[in-house]
Amino acid sequence: MVPFRTVEKSAFKAMLQAFDKQYVLPNRKYFSQKAVPALYQTVKEGIIRDLKEVYHFSMTTDIWSSVNMMPYMSLTIHYLNANWELQSKCLETLFIPESHTGDNLAEALRSSLQEWSLDEGKLACITTDNGANIVAAVRKLGWQWLNCFGHNLHLAVTNALKSEKDRTARAIGLCRTLVTTFSQSWQKKRKLIKEQAELNLPQHCLVVDCSTRWGSTQKMVERVLEQCPAIKRVLDDRRSQHLIPTWQDVEVLESVNAALKKVADFTDALSSETMVTASSLKPVLQLLREDLLLPTEEDTELARNLKKKMTGVLEEKYSAPATQVLLAKASFVDPRHKDSNSDDIKDKLLEEMLAVPEEGRDDRVVMQISMTEDGEGASRLAPPSKKKKSLADLLGKRQEQTRPLIPKRIRADTELARYLQEETLDAHSDPLAWWRDNQARFPLLSNVARKYMTVCATSTPSERVFSAAGNIVTPFRSSLKPDKVNMLVCLAKNIKMDK
């Protein structure tokens, strides 16, 4: 999105004249007041039209301040289309001038759903960070809430390092000083490149950590350890020798890296907008607790303490009963993880299956479809014949009419039992593709799966919205009105999908 004033620049006008001398270029007011609002309205109507066909959806939200310190709240929606493809749309970048209390945020969220003609009853879950105000807003609305895995893991790392601050503060602080030193001195940076070549080290720059960037501390520590031999050569002079890491510093950094490296990749893996993520949270937490963060004999005392602290923080963040039930349900309807659930979760899912509406459906036909073992006849019923009916047709119709109705409870129990008998998918398989191919065999359970497959494990989609917003509300465009910001961000995130 380029500024509106681009159309008034002489170079831009000259370029268009070179293309077509007869073209009359509209002024910036035309684009600002007519073209962009009209395009926004078209895109919005298209999204609302698509959302009317959605069975269930989930949302993510977060709050951000622009370059001119104006607060905005983003709202993204996630749902499955008819072909079982996960879709994401940015609905709002809402200006929130009032105090960010739970009541005000709750009102803003509810107003946004009404603006987009969304039914709260179809909302499966909303994923946010752990901010007290947004948590209070979600509770006030009575919505299912899931805290962001990325924020939780970052908090676990931060708290673990703070708990061992006396042992890690110097080494971590030294890493930050080294990053600053090499970033501010071209001579040292040039010498580092030379030493990397002589030592056959990767031509990598040092990484700076950021308090709001997940996993950046581990990346900084790992890069310093990787480049330590070259760093020592560059700083081997009287004025810089105090910056060279000592063997004690290296030992601390190795312990920190050993504890953090095993969990560093999980945040990226669970931040996708096109793949199912929440269903993998329970297995991931179990893997962290029972394997990756389990202290071993090879670990140093510092590494063991960091792992124990991180495990404790993660267990606390996901200890709420409602969260445990949500993760268990999401895991159950994922064919990759369905074997690791208890009977009480099956009972809860059974209740949801019984609540699935079935307008205009004949229980006898549904039962016949769901009991089809190979699924070949599940997706296609014979079209009505136009030829003269035979005696077999008449007798068959009579038998169909006299066949007893199958209670919904029995059909739901049958679906659950047959689903558990299915072979568990490989971890690399696509659960959405499996459900697309088997939804006719499990008409009740597939509807429940549509609900929980949309839930996001992290609030990353909303943070990606802020990245797009930051490219729009730049220092040169800090006077953009909030309604224009909302339109431009919505178009930037959604217009490619509507071409």
Image (cartoon, grey):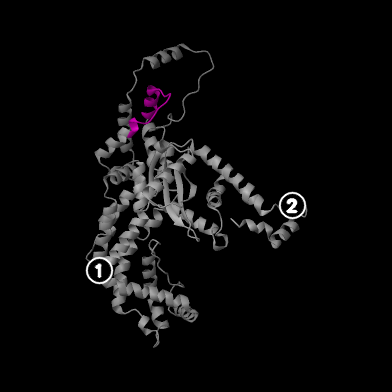
Q: Which residue is mark 1?
A: 302
**Circle 2: residue type:** Val
**Circle 1: residue type:** Leu
Quarter holding the C terminus?
top right
Closer-to-camera residue (414/253): 253
Farthest residue toward the front?
Answer: 98
Q: Which mark is residue 24?
A: 2
Name the spot of residue 395 as percent of width and height, x first. Answer: 42, 12
The residue at 29%/66% (across/down) is 161
Q: CA distance from mark 1 to mark 2?
A: 70 Å
193 over 150 or under it: above or below: below
Closer-to-camera residue (277/208): 208
**Residue 279 makes an appearance in the image:** no
The residue at 32%/59% (across/down) is 155
Q: Is residue 359 magenta?
A: yes
What range of the chain is rendered magenta?
A: 352-371
Farthest residue toward the top?
Answer: 391
Q: Nearer the viewer, mark 1 or mark 2?
A: 2
